[in-house]
Amino acid sequence: MKKTLSLILVMLMMLFSFPTFAEDISLNAIFMKQAGYSEDDVLAMTQAFTESTGIQVNPTFVAYEELAPKILTASASGGYDVILGDCIWPAQFAKAGLVLDVTDRLGEVDLDDIYQGALDATKYEGKYYGMPWLNDVKYMFVNMELLKQAGIEEAPTTWDQLIEDAKACKEQGICEYPIVGCYAQAECLICDYTCIAGSFGGAFVDENNQPTLDSAENIAALDFMAQTLKDGLCNPKSLEMIEDDVLSTFASGSAVFAINWTYQYASMNDEAQSSVVGQGIITPIPGTDKAQSATVNGGMPLMITSGCKHPDEAWEYMLFLASREMQARYCANALPIWKSLYTDPQVIETAGAEVVAASQIQFDYIVNRPMVPYYNELSTAMQSEIQLVLLGQKTAQEALTGLQATALELADR
Amino acid sequence: MELKREEERYGYFLITPSMIVVFGVIIIPIITTLVYSFVNIDPLSSHNGEFAGLSFYRKALTSSEFWADLGRTLYFTAASTAIETIFGLMIALLLNEDFPGVKFLRSIIIIPWAIPTVVNGSLWKLMLNGEYGVINALLMRMHLIDAYQSWLGNPKTAMLCIVIADAWKMTPLAVIFFLAALQGIDRTRYEAAMVDGAGAFRRFTTITLPALRPTIMVIIVMRTVEKFKAFDIFYLMTRGGPANSTKTLMYDTYLQAFTNLNYSEASTLAYLIVLVVVLMTLGYIRLMRREDS
């Protein structure tokens, strides 16, 4: 009996004393299957990483709305090593101790060559909590074919001009609802409102992260959104639409103007998905006399969870996915984080010269949603209140005054 | 003696896996959730980990949002259960008759119930789509509407749409219950009533309905409790929108836990849901006892 026990003990010691090779390491990663890199792109990048390092990675793909719940429920058991997070999450995740501080690791990265918007998406209280990866902002998509039918040759550069163009399209019976927005009770509503409020000169927090929701600019922007619905210029079904619905409405030729992420460009020019191939253009979001344009930061960094047992390998994987080589190869659905790649002929050809040109202007007008730990709770409150305004059940002033009080209360929690 | 002890040990060995499951996924989470409702478990708060007493319960019960959520939950529960019970009974009465093809109808009636809620929710969302939904097309053809409507984007119709989607899926369950009960009723009672000159409606109110009363009670109790806890159909179809018009207590619990990381408020709401369900169940039990006596 003693002999057997000793033998088992020796065997166990031998087993645990073996060094761990890269081939033995397996990482779990979670991504979203919505805007940005496609599932196939991520799988191809991951396969290339495994082939070059021997490190196995098991990627999981979920819809954007399921990303945070999946990450949070798995955090207690250390389910994922690498997570893709929205730019509004690092503050919350960092404060809750769910992700690792990678400020030191970022020292080896050429940060000067990364767009500020993508970098900001990883930052909270001066520290970095991820590697910038998905560099995305919203743009204005215009169906020029429909616009030309109304006798208009140029895409609008101001909201006033856009309203005039929309009225012309509606009055001439070219399009019943020329504008479409993703105004469902979801984060996409806040993204659209951020763009429009920004172009009216508004912001949700000041430079000290103090709430400024009830500013005159924010009120004017919300009034503007509600008015487009009231005037029948904006599709009333926008209140149940998220990004994919906006894309399909635009791609079916039922809208002249739509705000959406970069991925719409490839989809609206794909014959399998669109009946308006070659008719639409991508252009910066219009502005007002307060701001020439504004867009929302949709950057999404890759982060290492605090429960990750192989942070070095996880970091290596993140660097690989965000490398110039990978970003240049898979830029059809998401533009690179690296400034130097925007002159690369391969990138210009794959992403489209029009997309690259629009991004060069739009990147100068990025507005961040509040990067505060309580953002998600504030966003939930904003979504329902903004919808009440869009439905005509509340005034913008009432809704934003109430939201300002909510934001102050949350900031003090 | 030795044999008995060995048997005892073997018995413990056999129940160990189920004990681990019961404690791991039921007992411990129930206790943890209860503890969380009295202690501030909010990683974003400066009071994280502090004992909070009944403050979360006080906060919930004094908030207008809680009562609005409760109202919407009760509306969904009552409307959906009523539709299921009434339509379930009507369909069961039809399927209890003898006509060609009844066996085929009885077998296909189960299909909606067999469809997973995820599929059901997505299916109804597509059918109700304001841009290309088949329901809009159908209503337009029937000249009941003059333009496509945003059923899920309108606070007045969104909850009703979810009620219909849920009732469509779950009515077959009520049909099966009623059909089983109907087939247990002695046919000679109907024959005797017909001899006495009782019409179809009279036979229904004096024979069928009293015989079905226990089944109706069981369906109402079972479905009420289930519907009060419904979450998936709301998550799939509206996510609480538009303008919170479909936000129920269960959905708010999810938001508090997985969006706001406010585990204590979520735990408190979860226990308040349990409390309401327990109260409703006790009420039903009392009603059933009164019926029996």
Image (cartoon, coloured by chain):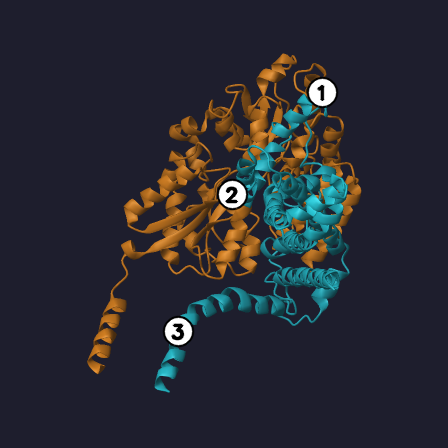
Q: Position of residue B74 (x, y in %)?
A: 72, 51
Q: Which chain is cyan?
A: B
Which chain letter goes with mark 2? Answer: A
B169 with respect to A7 (left or right): right
Q: Position of residue A304 (x, y in %)?
A: 45, 55
Q: Position of residue A116 (x, y in %)?
A: 52, 43
**Closer to the observer: label 3 or label 2?**
3
Q: What amino acid is at disc 2? A: Ala
A167 with respect to A56 (left or right): right
**Closer to the observer: label 1 or label 3?**
3
How far, Cα to Cα, is label 1 from label 3?
Answer: 77 Å
Q: Residue furthest bottom?
A: B1
Q: Residue placed at 62% from the left, 17% from the top? A: A147
**Closer to the observer: label 2 or label 1?**
2
Element type at mark 2: loop
How far, Cα to Cα, is label 2 from label 1?
Answer: 36 Å
Counting other residues with Cα less than 10 Å from the Cα at mark 3, is it few (<14), some (14-19), or many (20 or more)?
Answer: few
Q: Which residue is mark 3?
A: B13
Q: Residue placed at 69% from the left, 45% from the top? A: B190
Q: Which residue is mark 2?
A: A63
Q: Colour of chain A?
A: orange
The C terminus of chain B lies in which quarter of the figure?
A: bottom right
- Between A261 and A174, which is closer to the camera in this rendering? A174
Looking at the rendered structure, which numbered label has been put on residue A167?
1
Element type at mark 3: helix
Does B203 appear above or below A335? below
